[in-house]
Image (cartoon, grey):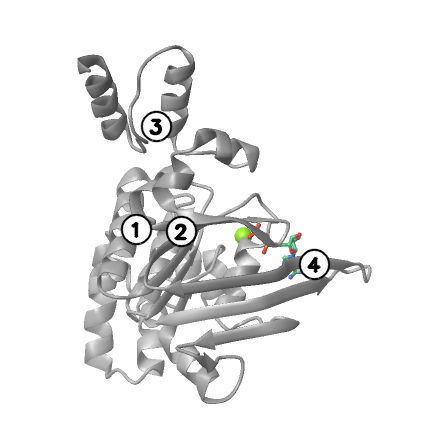
Amino acid sequence: MRVRLEGASVTYEGAAGERNRALDDVTLSLDGGVTGLMGQTGSGKSTLLEVLAGVLPPDSGRLLVDGADALRGPGARRLAASVGLVFQIPERQFFESTVEREVCFGLLARGAGAREARERAASALALMGLDLDEIGRRSPFALSGGQQRRVAIASVLALRPALLLLDEPTAGLDPRARAACLAAVRAAAEGGATVVVASHDANALAAVADRVVALEAGSVTLDGPMRALLGDAGLMRAHGLEGACAARAASALRRAGVDVPGTPLTAEELASAIARGRAS
Ligand code: ADP
Ligand code: MG
C-alpha cells in the first residue's frame, strides 16, 4: 500500500490551554518495506503513527493512500480496512474480556467467520509464542506487561494489514519474544505490507528496517537507507539518538586505531569486519 502524508501538522491543547505542536509540517512517502521511526521521547513518533493510521486527523495537510484522500470518504474507509496499529501502551488497545475475544475482534469486524477468526488468532498468537488454548480465556488486562504486548501485536498481525504500524513493539519483551516480534515484522514486509516501526532500539531497527526516519520536535530531520544512518555513530549522536551497539563499537575501535572496514550493525558483522581488517 502506498501512503503519502503531506504537510501534516498536529497541535495538542494542554490542560492549562497551552498549545503544543507535536507534528510540524511532516511530509513522508511510504511504499512497502520496513521504515524505522526514531526520535527522542516527545519528538512526535506516536502522534505520527496515529496520523498515518487515520485515527488522529491532522490540523492541516493531506493523507493519501494509493493516491486517494484518506482523511474522508472512500479513501478513509479503505485505510480503516487496511491498517493495523499496535499502540505504545497495549492496554490502550484492549477492551474485550478475554484474550480470545480480543484477538478475534478485528477479524470478526472485518468479516471473518468465527472459525476462521479463531484459527487466525491462534496462529498469530503462536507467532508471538503464545498458546490460544492456554491463554485465550484470560483477561488481557490481567496479563504481565510482556504478555500484553505480545497479545496486542498478535491481535494486529492476525489482521494481516497492508499498512502495519507498531509503536515501540519490543519495549519490555524478553529476547525470545523480541526476536519473534522482529521476525513477524520482517515477514509482514516480505509479504508486501508497508510497515513502520517506531523504536528507540537501534539494534532492533538494524535487524528489520530498510529505511530510517528520525523526528526531532515534530519535524523529520533524517530520512535515508537504514545502514547508512544506523551505521554512522557520529550522525546518530549528533541527532541525540543512540546508534546500533556494533556501530558504536566500530567507531570506538577506529578511534583506537583498529581498522574496521564497512558499516557493521550486528555483533556478527562487527566480528567479521575486524577479522577482515586484520587480514588486509
Ligand atoms: P513520542 O511518541 O515521540 O514520545 P508523542 O507523539 O507521544 O511523541 O508526543 C509528541 C508531543 O505531543 C509531546 O510533547 C507530548 O507531550 C505531546 N502530546 C502527545 N499526546 C498528547 C495529548 N494527548 N495531549 C497533549 N499533548 C500530547
Ligand atoms: Mg511514543
Q: Disc 4 residue type?
A: Arg
> Does the CB distance between marks 1 and 2 fall below 8 Å?
yes
- Residue 31 marker: none
Residue pointed to by mark 2: 169
Quick check: 65 left or right of 15?
left
Q: How far apart are marks 1 and 2 (CA)?
A: 8 Å
Across and down, in percent, residue 229 comes to: 42, 40
State which mark lies toward you, 4 or 1: 4
Residue pointed to by mark 4: 21
Residue pointed to by mark 1: 181
Q: Disc 1 residue type?
A: Cys
> Does the CB distance between marks 3 and 2 fall below 8 Å?
no
Q: Quadrant of residue 56?
A: bottom right
Q: Disc 2 residue type?
A: Pro
Q: Distance between the residues labelled 4 and 3?
A: 35 Å
Q: Disc 3 residue type?
A: Ala
The single residue placed furthest to the top in the displayed view is: 257
Give the structural element (helix, strand or loop) at label 4.
strand
Quarter of the C terminus within the rendering:
top left
